[in-house]
Amino acid sequence: MKKHVQACIIDDDAIAVFGLKRAMAIIGFTTDVLIYENGLDALENFAQRIKDGSEIPSLLFIDINMPVMGGWDFMEEFTKVLPYKKNMPKIFIMTSSIDLRDMEKATAYGLESNYLIKPVSADVLEGIVG
């Protein structure tokens, strides 16, 4: 039996969210998906979960460019909020950007191999979570 996985999509693009959720359904990955339209909403929810002793999602898909708090600002704050590195969820950065500075930032967080170009297809998703 597969281990239960709660995924979280942090992205303000409804079409990208729909596509990623559809890709998850196609590969039979998970139906337990939290969605936030910006990093601040996700960060506040995760901070409350940590405070309450609850688990945060084990898999995060984070868009770089969002209003209120983008992906890189979220990552900077999230690494301060999460008390133990061993509890760090698997994180994927999603973007339609081809800016090399974004890849450099991904590398700084150790996410260079978790850098996904949108839209994320079912084949790509299966390759990383399957």
Image (cartoon, rainbow, N blue to C red):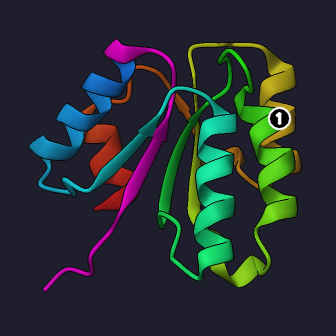
Where does the image place residue 106, in percent across and percent down from the top left? 77, 41
Where does the image place residue 81, in percent across and percent down from the top left? 80, 63
Looking at the image, residue 9 sits to the left or right of residue 52; the answer is left
- Split into 4 quadrants, where in the image is the N terminus? bottom left
Instruction: Give the magenta part as a residue range.
Output: 1-15
Frontmost residue, 5 versus 102: 5
In the depicted structure, whether residue 69 falls above or below residue 90: above
Looking at the image, residue 69 sits to the left or right of residue 87; the answer is right
Quarter residue 95 falls in: top right
Label 1 SS: helix
Q: Residue at x 19, y 53 (%)?
A: 31
In the depicted structure, whether residue 62 falls above or below residue 77: above
Q: Residue at x 77, y 81 (%)?
A: 84
In the depicted structure, whether residue 74 falls above or below residue 95: below
Where does the image place residue 129, in percent across and percent down from the top left? 35, 59
Q: What residue is pinned by disc 1?
A: 73
Frontmost residue, 32 versus 122: 32
